[in-house]
Image (cartoon, grey):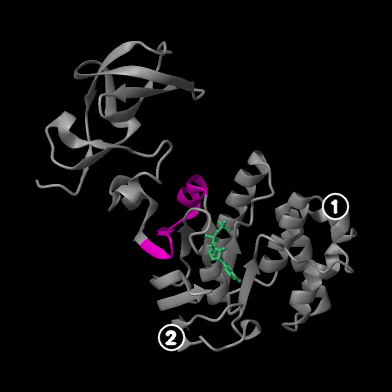
Amino acid sequence: MSLEVNDIIKAFNKKMILDKITLKVEKGEFFVILGPSGSGKTTLLRIIAGLEKPDDGKIIIDGKDVTTLPSGKRNIGMVFQNYALYPSKKVRENLYLPLESVGVTKEEAIKKIEFISRRLGIENLLDRFPSELSGGQQQRVALARALVRTPKLFLMDEPLSNLDAPQRVSARKLIKEIQEEYSITSIYVTHDQTEAMALADRMCIIDQGKILQIGTPEEIYENPNSEEVASFIGNPPMSIIDGKILGIDGAVGIRAEDVKLEGGQLKGRVADCEFMGDRYLIHIHLENGEIRAFSKNKIKEGSDVSFEVLRFKQFGGKS
Ligand SMILES: Nc1ncnc2c1ncn2[C@@H]1O[C@H](COP(=O)(O)OP(=O)(O)OP(=O)(O)O)[C@@H](O)[C@H]1O
């Protein structure tokens, strides 16, 4: 199933929330919408799902305009932050209902429920009510419920937010595996760039209701098209500083891995040294800003360091 979002506009109380959003997701693609809190991600996903009406623009699924089609008729699976399981029904029934509604036989349904429950590690929870589950368990059940009938279009809004770090990594892997196995066109909303990078075939960065950039994670990491994107992507993101120190007009973005400590012409003072496990992240205070670098060794705060910039990205300015 392919999806086109064409010039979507949405305002709440006269405040523009989505400002002409246009994007295209190919059949079988895993597309991530990444942006800070309040940027309009959930609103966009709700419009794609048919849970919210746009003020203008079109949603096209497989070439068909579905802008006015009710959510139930769009053949999509959804997992939202509030998982909305049926509270009066046990997990098994929660998983059975979506299958029943598409006419799957009882035997086939049992097999599918068993399979997906095993994959998501919820096979021991099938006879419990949602109120008897932790937030993370409810989230896994919600994922299972959305996946059990292998939807053609799968919409996820921060579906792993209640899982702890190891569970997140394994659930992430599982979502990707199932998505690839069944070639489910998927749209995944998150504010977590690590998650976005790990999952996306392609992704977009959205901020204040506008798309800043669309591309593969590699393209966006390597070639952010603006200071906004550059200061959002990467761990840590690029340091944005005045290019003057490199003899360049305008702002430049520099990744920590592209700064070589010791022996360069440039000088600064260590403002902070953070332990990252396999190395240290050094914050270097410059006359006109701050730059980050990695170091194998701990460096004392307040020490003077020299460094060299191996690679940078120029933003604006005259070249
Ligand atoms: N029903 C509504 N009525 C009024 N304002 C709304 C409504 N829904 C969302 N908003 C506003 O729209 C903006 C975008 O909200 P949205 O939930 O789409 O952002 P988000 O990027 O998903 O944020 P988060 O990551 O925090 O969930 C916010 O300022 C929010 O307050």
The mark found on residue 182 in the picture is: none
Task: Indicate the position of residue 159 as horizontal and vertical percent values.
Answer: 63, 57
Task: Look at label 1 and name its amino acid.
Answer: Asn
Q: Residue at x 53, y 61 (%)?
A: 188
Q: Within 10 Å of the Cα at label 2, are there few (<14), some (14-19), or many (20+) other Cα atoms?
A: few
**290 shown above or below 5:** above
Q: Residue furthest front?
A: 14
Quadrant containing ligand 1 reads bottom right
Does the image show residue 55? yes
**What residue is pinned by disc 2?**
63
Rendering quarter of residue 155: bottom right
What is the x, y in percent for residue 285? Answer: 32, 23
**Can you say whether 71 is above or below 214 in the image?**
below
Residue at position x 41%, y 36% in the image: 236
What x and y, as percent, mark residue 24?
A: 40, 72
Seen in the image, is 46 located left or right of residue 224?
right
Magenta-colored stretch includes residue 206: yes
- Residue at image point 76% right, 51% down: 135
Disc 2/disc 1 C-alpha distance (Å): 42 Å
Q: Where are the magenta residues, as a range?
A: 192-211
The answer to which quarter of the image holds residue 116 is bottom right
Q: Nearer the viewer, mark 2 or mark 1?
A: 2
Q: Which mark is residue 124?
A: 1
